[in-house]
Image: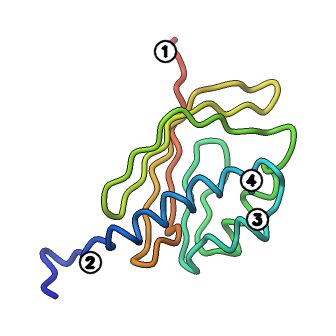
Amino acid sequence: MIRSRGRRPPPSAAATSAGVDHVRLSYVYLDSGDLDGYGSLLDEQAQVRRPDTPQGQGRAQTLRVHAGIAGPPARHELHRVVADGESVVVFGRYVRPPLDVEFADIFTLTDLGLLLGYQRFYFVAPG
């Protein structure tokens, strides 16, 4: 397969579909505090960038980042999930009292549909 401009080819439709399932399941695992389950969805080279935590690089560090914010009372309410190739975007609401804010997460998938990483953005009114 020919790769253009140094980029890897996108995952198959089946891998993208599996990746969407993994993304949805990741929120279930995080909300319940199941870090082992969450870790099973991550690629070894996973990376996470959030404005409310240190950056995580690699599966172990990504799990450490989430250890402090996973589990009740935190919960994610997903409003929309959009997928195309290696990318999955999730729009929703993150509630962890006293925080209650809308978010967008942009995930990157591996060729096997594992989570290679994500970046989170929060909606905050200017001012």
| Colour mapping used in the image | rainbow
Q: Where is residue 100 in the image (x, y as percent from the top left)?
A: 70, 24
Q: Where is residue 61 in the image (x, y as percent from the top left)?
A: 69, 70
Residue type highlighted by circle 1 = Pro
Name the residue beneath numbered marker 2: 8
Name the residue beneath numbered marker 1: 126
Between 88 and 63, the residue placed more toward the observer is 88
Residue at (60, 71) in percent of width and height: 42
Name the residue beneath numbered marker 4: 30
Q: Sort mark 2 into few (<14), some (14-19) or many (20+) by Cα contacts within 10 Å.
A: few
Q: Distance between the residues labelled 1 and 4?
A: 29 Å
Classify mark 1: helix, strand or loop: loop
Picture layout, residue 66 above or below residue 50 = below
Determine which quarter of the picture holds residue 2. Answer: bottom left
Check the image and name the residue furthest to the top.
Answer: 127
- The reply to whether the C-beta atoms of the residues labelled 4 and 2 are less than 8 Å apart is no
Classify mark 4: helix, strand or loop: helix
Q: Which of marks 1 and 2 is in front?
A: 2
Residue type highlighted by circle 4 = Leu
Q: Sort mark 1 into few (<14), some (14-19) or many (20+) by Cα contacts within 10 Å.
A: few
Classify mark 2: helix, strand or loop: loop
Q: How far apart are marks 4 and 2 (CA)?
A: 29 Å
Return the mark for residue 64. Answer: 3
Q: How far apart are marks 1 and 3 (CA)?
A: 31 Å
Classify mark 3: helix, strand or loop: helix
Q: Which of marks 1 and 3 is in front?
A: 3
Between 84 and 68, the residue placed more toward the observer is 84
- The reply to whether the C-beta atoms of the residues labelled 1 and 4 are less than 8 Å apart is no
- The reply to whether the C-beta atoms of the residues labelled 1 and 2 are less than 8 Å apart is no
Which of pointers 1 and 2 lies earlier in the amino acid sequence? 2
